[in-house]
Image (cartoon, rainbow, N blue to C red):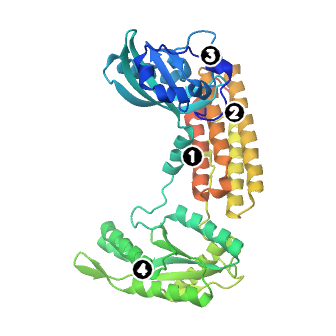
Amino acid sequence: MNATGGTAMSSAQQAIPEPSTANDAVLALGALLRHDLLPLCIVRDGWLTYGNGAFARAFALGTPEAPLRFTDLVVEEDRPATAERLAAIAAGTTPSARFGFHGILPDGTVRDVEFFGTASQSGQGTAIAGLVLDVTERVRTQSRLSSLAFADALTGLANRAQFLDRLRDAFVAAQAAGTRFAVLLGDLDGFKAVNDARGHEAGDLVLQAVAKRLRGAARANDTVARLGGDEFAMILPSIGTTEHAALVAGRIVRSVQDPIAIDGDTVSVGISVGVALHPAHGEDMDSLVRAADAAMYAAKTDGRGRYAVAVPGGAGGEATPLRFVEWNEAAAVGVEAIDAQHRRMAELINQLGEQLKAIEPPERLAITLEALLDFTREHFASEERLLETHAIEHLERHRRAHRRLLDDLASLASGVDQQSMALTMRYLQDWLFVHIEGADRPLGEVLNARGIR
């Protein structure tokens, strides 16, 4: 559904009758109608009496076999609300209105649509002049952005997701320019005692004060993040030497040691910091973070309130991994074939995540995404066969939902290597589990009730 793209076919132009020159609603939008730039239509008594070429292209309309109600272009579940809103405009209850619905094309494709309608009087009665916009891509983008915040709510620092994105950016920049960068991981010393003695509100004030001091110790282009709890991290791009990274780590340790004012009193905490440089201490995200994590624990073991630099090749311990899709049996719907397919989809999503972490070339990412798309098509086809075989209601609704999910996945695949890694993976996780909970779990319950497992 593209309001401006493509050339209108003659059959599409004939899809809806030409307007009457007496129609005031058409005259009011005459310039736009003549230039055919925006998808415009006229609705009278719920019937579509005119649509310009852009409108016909938007809904892929050919020569109609019968008159069209406007709601014929709307998915079944949205038709009552759409009809009610059009009636309110025509009745003058809301003479101008803007609302959204899910439009449906002849091939079953579902699109997000915004309708802007205004009532106009003519000798033939009340007509609604409407502007119809395809906002599918905007809705998809908003959905992805709303699924993941990049700032820590308490401190305002970058959160774990943004830290991981910035870390990947640092690897990309280092590979392109041959530069080095450092990762610092810090864990507060004595924070639990303050939190236990003073309460969580005082603990939050301490974390906020520490965050402010970390920002003060960082350079303008450094990333300062709170990973969770009393764990903090910093990315130092274009750092020259281990000594330069150590200078920043030393500033951090000293700044956090200063007493913090809390409710007319002061408390003291410290911080232990681990320093790791790329590529000396790690050539990929996991190994570099693991090296910084091991160095941080070495600093704690050596007495706390200090920093330690990682040892090349000697990183031990386990850093918290970047988790993508964590499959467990709680996600199972109880139908063996469906559950096996869901597990495979999760595996493919995790494979993509590992490739993003390793900064693999776009063509490798495209292969994995195509494999995910192909397998998802197979999964949806097998579900639809089950629905047909067992005469389960709402088959067409399931098909539309499947088509929409496939379109969402195909849209995400475009330029995935240039998008946020954390946002991409969180979106795919939600994409899978929303499908499972919204459609497949109810389907599983029906099939289980019929003895199908």
Q: Secondary structure at mark 1?
A: helix
Give the structural element (helix, strand or loop) at label 3.
loop
- Residue 54 visible, this angle: yes
Of tags 2 and 3, the one toward the viewer is 3
Expressed as whole percent of the image width and height from the top left, the position of residue 320 reads 59, 67
Quadrant of residue 140 in the image? Answer: top right
Q: Amino acid at mark 4?
A: Gly
List x then y, in percent, for residue 163: 54, 67
| C-beta proximity under 8 Å, tags 1 and 4 | no
**Nearer-the-camera pick, 382 or 92:** 92
Query: What amino acid is labelled 1 in the image?
Result: Asp
Q: Which residue is mark 3?
A: 14
For disc 4, the neighbor class at 10 Å (few under 14, some 14 to 19, many from 20) is few
Tag 1 residue: 430
Give the label, 3 or 4, closer to the camera.
3
Residue denoted by label 4 = 216
- Point out residue 62 in the picture as x, y percentages from the top left corner: 65, 19
- Compared to residue 453, the image places residue 342 above or below, namely below
Q: Is residue 121 left or right of residue 335?
A: left
User: Is disc 2 in contact with disc 3, using a CB cutoff of under 8 Å?
Assistant: no
Disc 2 marks which residue? 380
